[in-house]
Image (spheres, rainbow, N blue to C red):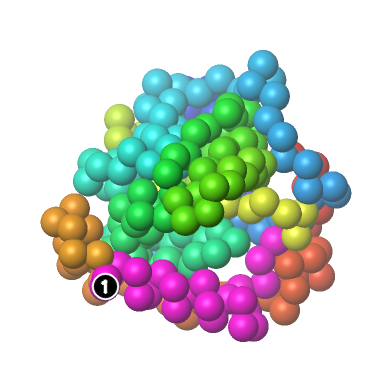
Amino acid sequence: MSTQPSQHGGDSGKVNFPTDASLPGEHFEVRQTHPTGDYKPDPSKSLPLSAARQSLLDDIIALYEMKPTVERVKRYTPDCVYNDQFVYANDRYKLAGQWFALPKLFNGAKSHGYEVVTNDRDLIQFKHEEEWTFKIIPKTAVVNAIVSLSLDPATIDSDFIRVKYHKDQANEKDYSNEGIGAAIKKFQADKVANLMSSPEVQEFEADKDAGKEKRRTYGTGKKEGDAPVKDV
């Protein structure tokens, strides 16, 4: 979309998504493929963020490190979408179930650093290295990914910025959002929240009725599927 001179606390001024905050999260999906899939961060090259944006990023990293709180989950709009290799959650209730379920699956999670590579008017992207220690099998996995946070137009200029669409992409290809894999991702997200009886997850039960649209499909996760090559 449009690019304007930076007037917003150091962001580039570039606008990528609609400015209508009433639109559900599906309208705020960033699409991209990467030439190599190398998302290893170099923290020394990380772009600086305003205080409000840094606070948002700190909360997101804390969620990745299995430190969920109700306040941190409120960083998302009720009609948000979360999309990664294993999960497609299309409201905040389902997403709360995911964040609060992590300690049941993992013994530990630690961020090894991040590099902010995009700081647009409505989009923050960062390369992230995360270590996961599994609970059932004594194994540790380190994952490098590009994380895209599409920002809520209504809160971009506030002290508490919220997220409309959170995508975690660990491979060079984007997600096609269709086929058996996508169906499993959505099924998992739909069921986990309902199995979580914690009061923290129930705090977001009303968000089940948040506005949402049908999952957008692209046929492929390559550039032919509306995912242009970007060397971020």
Can I make out residue 18 in this image? Answer: no
Q: Which residues are magenta?
A: 174-195
Residue at 27% across / 47% down in the picture?
Answer: 74
* Residue 192 position within the rendered picture, expressed as x and y whole percent measured from the top left: 34, 69
Where residue 170 sits: x, y (%)? Answer: 67, 51
The amino acid type of the residue labelled 1 equals Asn
Is 125 left, or right, of 36 in this rendering? left
In which quadrant is the C terminus drawn? top right
Q: Position of residue 61 (x, y in %)?
A: 45, 35
Which residue is drawn at the image coordinates 52% and 32% (left, top)? 111
Q: Which residue is mark 1?
A: 194
Report x, y in % for residue 86: 55, 64
Q: Residues within 10 Å of mark 1 (few under 14, many from 20)?
A: some
Residue 135 can be seen, yes or no: yes
Report if residue 225 lies within the magenta region. no
Frontmost residue, 152 versus 140:
140
Which secondary structure is most common in the magenta stretch?
Answer: helix
Q: Residue at x 53, y 43 (%)?
A: 132
Residue 44 position by quadrant: top right
Give the left or right position of residue 46, taking residue 108 as reference.
Answer: right
In depth, the one of 137 and 100 nearer the eye is 137
Tag 1, which secondary structure? helix
